[in-house]
Image (cartoon, rainbow, N blue to C red):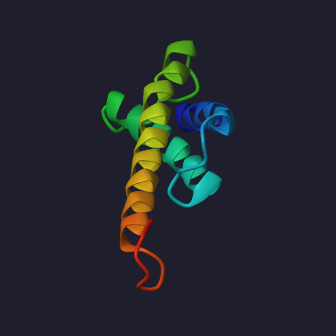
Amino acid sequence: MGALAWTMMGLALWHFTIFIPDRFWAGIVGAFLGSIFGALLFGLAVNGFTVPGQDATDLLVVLQAVPGSILGVALVYWIGVRAEEKQAGDGLAGLPSE
């Protein structure tokens, strides 16, 4: 049940990426994957790589996904910015960049 809660929190926080300039690696889909996987991995890491059951899932377990989701989105954004800068530095088809 904890994994479902982490996934839903990652999905909820992903919706706020529309307010950030779209420089994510793989676009909005990359932001989605970063948010979901970040929330899941962080939630697992905090709980010792075990998933809390239905009785152990409470508000604190759900909120554990927030930092992971933000870190996942930030990582995908950072990768996208680096890819854009590298592409801009390479120029188009051998033409000098402006």
> At 45% from the left edge and 41% from the top edge, which residue is drawn?
72
Which of the two residues, 89 or 37, is positioned nearer the viewer here? 89
Res 4 quadrant in image: top right
Label total for image = 0
Picture quadrant where residue 50 is located: top left
Q: Residue furthest left?
A: 48
Q: Is residue 56 visible?
A: no
How far across and how far down the image is residue 91, in percent?
A: 42, 74
- Viewer-nearest residue: 62 or 66: 66
Residue at the image point whose x is 55% and y is 33% from the top: 6
The residue most toward the top is 59
Residue 5 location (% of width, % of height):
60, 31
Q: In this view, does 7 lie to the left or right of 15?
A: left
**For residue 79, above or below residue 95:** above
Q: Does residue 63 show up? A: yes
Residue at 63%, 37% (x, y): give it.
17
In the rendered image of this protein, does residue 18 appear above or below residue 47?
Answer: below
